[in-house]
Image: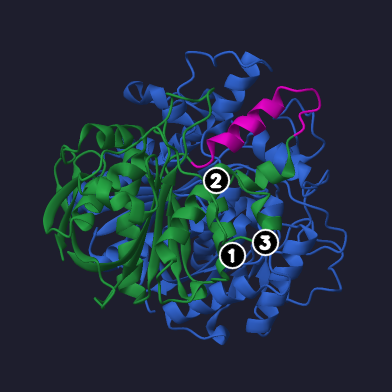
Amino acid sequence: MMRISIEHIGLMAPGMAGWDAARPVLRGEQAPDTQTLPAFWPNLLPPNERRRTTALIKLALQAAEDALRHSPYALYELASVFASSEGDGEVVDRICQSLTLPDRPVSPTHFHNSVHNAPAGYWAIASGSRQFSTSLAAGADTFAAGLLEAATVAILQQRPVLLLSYDYALPPALAGRGYVDTIFGVALLLSAQASDATMGSLQLELKAGTVVPPILPAELAELREYNPAAAALPLLIALARAETADLALPCHDKLTLQIGIDM
Amino acid sequence: MSSEPLLITASSTVSALGRGIQVAKTALLQGRSGLRRNDYDDGRLDTWIGRVEGVENVVLPGALAPFDCRNNRLAALGLETDGFATAVATARQRYGARRIGLFLGTSTSGIEATEQAYLQRGSGDGPLPASFDYRHTHNTYSCADFTRQYLELEGPAQVISTACSSSAKVFATASRYIQAGWCDAAVIGGIDSLCLTTLLGFNALELVSAQPCRPWDRHRNGINIGEAAGFALLEPDPGRAGVALLGYGESSDAYHMSTPHPQGEGALLAMRRALDSAGLTPVQVDYINLHGTATSSNDRAEDQAVTRLFKEVPCSSTKGWTGHTLGAAGITEAVFCKLAIENGLMPGTLNLQDIDPGLSAPILRDTQQRPVRVAMSNSFGFGGSNCALVFGWQG
């Protein structure tokens, strides 16, 4: 069992551009307009770096920026965990298309952006952080795996950890073949100690057994079906409502991540 | 932050040197390289590669057929080498399937399957072949999904994909998960397989050599891409002596996407953190297995980092044997460090002729039989992702 505090939240999802805008939706006071995709305006990166980025990288950094607006920490102090099920489908699509052309003109920029840790690399450049950072994937259960990794680092290193869980809709050629067909990015700033900034504390536990994920309203359930990062939604709803809750998230076959939420 | 030693109770390696730890040891002792002229891509790209023989002939178990791709075939080879799958079955009896974590590293996963699907379709925008199973082959988690089912494990699992540091960082994550109590033991490993994306991508960055790679040589001019699979079983208290992970250090360069920090700041930080975590000082390290890719800038940055921290610790790069196996480099070279400690063997730096006078780390040209109590292994990747591991005899 492990206890961890959530200090700040960022969100970039259809109909929920930013945590402030998302809260009434998550509290059920406002219907989500999931047809409206969030626009990106990440300011973390200087323009010369930003030009070389992709929609996935912007999604991750925008969620980070949303979470960090009120953070007391200097960016270089933060450790980070980047959890993405698919990585950058757009870049893969472009590289694989270029293989079908004469002379196979693979772009060097596309190639370095194709690594799963490309968003983490740009984040490190933007934040100046040389702290621990990892980039991981765990299929449909990528959010749960990211939360476990981030919480574990925060507790063992006694350092604030920025967890980013994000995936961008796969391009048309790959649509329907992977885990992701819509946009969702969430950022959680985790801390080992409770403070004035604590929005909620989580008690994490791994248990044997398979579980059905918590029920969600139809529009939000659809987001979760098409984006593994949206597995965070039941947790985000509890935090938006400032309610205690006990959640059970699937964490691979035959394993469950139990999350007890206290305010 | 200190960490408890984790014994490596089983391990395996498959690379261009062949299958198994004994084959690798013999090759290191005899100076036999696994590199060959590129024959993967019909030789269209003029380079040398580290290709694993026989990947094409691997047949996955029937129930796991949807996972069929070059990367998972290579994973299956690694699992059936050096008795690894059998050792995990025994550990499963001891700990229970749910208490064994699984942490694997890969950079490109089964991207070759997607490449082939696009090539089959051609340059239009029609649908990709219906038989193409993206989720089970190319998705980043595919190799862990496959391995978890292959080994019948039920514990926490993830793929770490941080380019060329991927299968070094799995040691660190496994150590943390065991320390935190999320699992009692861990299977870790790395798999990366040949594909056009890395061959042509590194070539587009002008980082691929047309000759066998020459780490630390004044005429070095780039990498040879290799493929490899390797696994290790880590246990905190197995009740016997052996080679253990003593510590790990991770850092970010925060400098550039595809070029290391020129003074090796990130690399230096990773090595310092690894020593701190092992509770050791630089003078206690006997041998360093360098990342040593043989690009001009990588070797220069690593040389700066090593010489700033260590005084006269012998070091070498084994990329001339295997090529740069990218996401599998960490596990491959961890197994070499284990070999070094068990056999009193310091691998030399194959293909090194004229040592670059601009580099000053005490590089070993030839393989030597000398006692190694503590070995460090460096792995650095795109995005400025750095990891250093410390191994030593525990008993």
Please tell me the colour of chain B: blue
The Cα atoms of the two marked residues, 2 and 1, are separated by: 23 Å
Location of residue B133 by image quarter: top left
Q: Disc 1: which chain?
A: A
Q: Which quadrant of the rendered structure holds the C terminus of chain A? A: bottom left
Front: mark 2 or 1: 1
Residue type beneath disc 3: His
Q: Secondary structure at mark 1?
A: helix
- Rendered view: B118 above or below A8: above
Residue B330 vs residue B250, the one in the foreground:
B250
Mark closer to the chain start, 3 or 2: 2
- Rendered view: B301 above or below B114: below
Q: Disc 3: which chain?
A: B
- Magenta stretch containing residue A88, yes or no? yes
User: What residue do we see at 57% from left, 60% from top?
Assistant: A43
Q: Disc 2: which chain?
A: B
Front: mark 3 or 1: 1
Residue A215 point in image, percent of width and height: 16, 38
Q: Which quadrant of the rendered structure holds the N terminus of chain A? A: bottom left
Please tell me the colour of chain A: green
Q: Secondary structure at mark 2?
A: loop
Magenta segment range? A87-105
Q: Are marks 2 and 1 in contact (CB under 8 Å)?
A: no
Disc marking residue B107: 2
Residue B264 vs residue A261, the one in the foreground:
A261
Residue B258 point in image, percent of width and height: 68, 56
Q: From the image, tell me which residue sits under label 1.
A: A126
User: What residue do we see at 54% from left, 14% from top?
Assistant: B127
Residue A179 point in image, percent of width and height: 39, 33
Residue B230 placement, left or right of B299: left
Q: From the image, tell me which residue sits under label 3.
A: B256
